[in-house]
Image: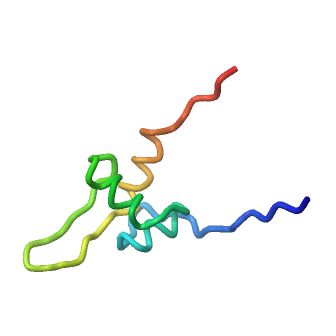
Amino acid sequence: MVVYMLKREPIQSDAVYSREESAELLGVSLSTVKRLIAAGQLEASRPDSIRRIFIKGSSILRMLEETKIEAVR
């Protein structure tokens, strides 16, 4: 059996990503990113009069750190 690992770009803490880019970086669907934002687990910004949603790389990294699963021994 051959297992292929996808190589993803590292998340840059000072970069700004769209929801689609965030989903790709995390390897999840766009709807999952939307749920994470709605649940307050992933911080996002939408300036007035702009339809687009922005997500800082630091917000993605913080969410990953805060939801880290500790190893069960």
Name above or below for residue 42 compared with residue 48.
Answer: above
Q: Quadrant of the N terminus?
A: bottom right
- Residue 15, position in %: x, y? 39, 69
- Residue 28, position in %: x, y? 51, 61
Along the line of sight, the residue nearer the viewer: 33 or 31: 31
Name above or below for residue 66 compared with residue 17.
Answer: above
Residue 53, picture quadrant: bottom left
In the image as oriented, which residue stretches furthest toward the right?
1
- Residue 66, position in %: x, y? 42, 39
Q: Quadrant of the C terminus?
A: top right
Q: Which color scheme does this rendered protein use? A: rainbow
Residue drawn at (40%, 47%), measured in percent from left and top?
A: 63
The answer to whether 31 appears left or right of 28 in the picture is: left
Along the line of sight, the residue nearer the viewer: 22 or 14: 22
Name above or below for residue 65 compared with residue 31.
Answer: above
In the image as oriented, which residue stretches furthest toward the top?
73
- Residue 25, position in %: x, y? 52, 66
Q: How many marks?
A: 0
